[in-house]
Amino acid sequence: MWWESQWWESESALRLFFFFGVLIIMSCWELLFPRRPLTMPKGGRWGNNLLLVFINSLALRLLVPLGGVGVAQYAGRQQWGLFSLWGWNGWWVVLLSVVLLDILIYAQHWMFHKVPLFWRLHMVHHVDLDIDVTTGLRFHTLEILLSFGLKAAAILALGISAEAVIIFEILLNGTAMFNHSNVRLPLVCDKLLRLFLVTPDMHRVHHSVIPHETNSNYGFNLPWWDYLFRTYCSQPKEGHDGMTIGLAEYREKSVEHLPYMLMLPFTAPRVKRTNND
């Protein structure tokens, strides 16, 4: 296939192009048409959040240098996975693979909320006192590595192609920045987009301090899984302008500092969050 010859060079270039392209577009959109005022200085938050992104990227490159694309290429050469076993190929298998990876991310996200050990890692994403484009990139390094392991297992089990993996990773990265962005969409556009894409207003509910809102809207890309599994919450109780972002237990400014983010899973007290809290 087309990626076999110079895939590594084009894969890296594609990912960087879309990453910086979406980041710049959403950053400008936030400045021009913000959805709600920020409560923390943007410079410090952005610096720490983006530095965490750099650490995560470096850790992935050092510990799993092949990446998801390399795992898919290896599985393809070995003819591993159900798709290879059944002889499935073509554009529709690529599309199916992207959808299956998306429901895997939904399930993983749900699991990181429900399993206490994983929640301690995922809290790093939720303690952010504001939500904007960089929040969509803010995850603890161990969560990033665990997420890669789950995705790699799915790639090997299904025999997902490298083409499908790179399409999915670009989509997931781009939509995560989009739906975490502090941007204003006309209500009509938001309503229509929610039929096939998680919107900023939809995902912002997930970052509410109210537990039953935190435990809703797990989708990052496709909204269908929240509708199907009844984890959808249309609007926050306090409204988008009145809602409080973050976790009620963590309101100090230090949550925005990189050392705090890295150490939080190991220092946080055991707090069981339920929908009835």
Image (spheres, helix red, strand yellow):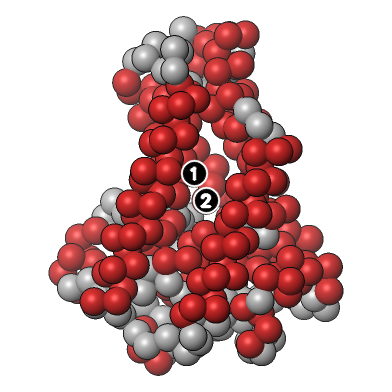
Say which quarter of the image contains residue 6: top left
Disc 1 packing (10 Å; few <14; some 14–19; many ≥20): some
The foreground one among 226 and 16 is 16
- Let me know if residue 96 appears in the view: no
- How far separated are the C-alphas under marks 2 and 1? 5 Å
Q: Are marks 2 and 1 in contact (CB under 8 Å)?
A: yes
- Let me know if residue 134 appears in the view: yes
Disc 1 on helix, strand or loop? helix
Percent across and percent down for residue 258 are 67, 70
Q: Amino acid at mark 1?
A: Ile
Percent across and percent down for residue 34 are 29, 79
Disc 2 on helix, strand or loop? helix
The foreground one among 151 and 142 is 142
- Asked if 47 appears above or below 160 in the picture, the reply is below
Q: Residue at x 62, y 78 (%)?
A: 256
Left or right of 190? Residue 118 is right
Quadrant in which the C terminus appears: bottom right
Q: Circle 2 sits on which residue?
A: 106
Q: Residue at x 73, y 53 (%)?
A: 142
Q: Amino acid at mark 2?
A: Tyr
